[in-house]
Image (cartoon, helix red, strand yellow):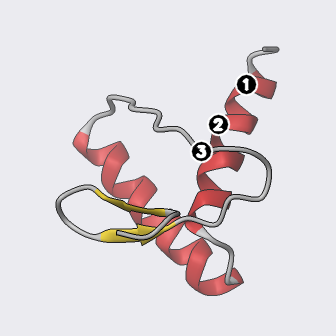
Amino acid sequence: MHDGEQNDGHETIREYVVHGELVDLKIKVSADLYRAYQRCSWIITHETGREQVDIMEEMVHDFLVKNGC
């Protein structure tokens, strides 16, 4: 495995780190929310060309801002 790659047992993802090191954040959600997030992030990725990591960071950032953190 090369620098910037992670293997979760299912697929290998190359992560391009722009600002610092990436860390895993594990959350528990219902199966419906999981499928909806996967579908939505896939659509955003393919329509905009953005990296999946960017979408994940935006989701966490928006949650923190919404809750005043």
Give the residue at mark 2.
60
Please name the residue shown 78% across and 14% down the image: 69
User: x%, y% of residue 47?
Assistant: 64, 85
Residue type indicated by callout 2: Val
User: x%, y% of residue 32?
Assistant: 29, 46
The Cα–Cα distance between marks 3 and 1, rounded to whole angstroms, is 17 Å
User: x%, y% of residue 18?
Assistant: 77, 58
Q: Earlier in the sequence, mark 2 or mark 3?
A: 3
The Cα–Cα distance between marks 2 and 1, rounded to whole angstroms, is 6 Å
- Identify the disc placed on residue 27: none
The picture quadrant where one finds residue 31 is top left
The picture quadrant where one finds residue 11 is bottom left
Determine whether label 3 and label 1 are within 8 Å by CB.
no
**Quadrant location of the N terminus in the rendered image:** bottom left
Q: Earlier in the sequence, mark 3 or mark 1?
A: 3
Please name the residue shown 59% across and 51% down the image: 56
Q: Is residue 55 above or below residue 59?
A: below
8 left or right, relative to 5: left
- Identify the disc placed on residue 22: 3
Query: Marks 2 and 3: which is nearer the front?
Result: 3
The Cα–Cα distance between marks 2 and 3, rounded to whole angstroms, is 13 Å
Please name the residue shown 74% across and 17% down the image: 67
Q: In this view, does 49 lie above or below 31?
A: below
SS label for mark 3: loop
Tell me if mark 2 has few (under 14), some (14-19) or many (20+) residues whose alpha carbon lies within 10 angstroms of its own: few
User: x%, y% of residue 39?
Assistant: 41, 67
The picture quadrant where one finds residue 9 is bottom left
Give the residue at mark 1.
64
Determine whether label 2 and label 1 are within 8 Å by CB.
yes
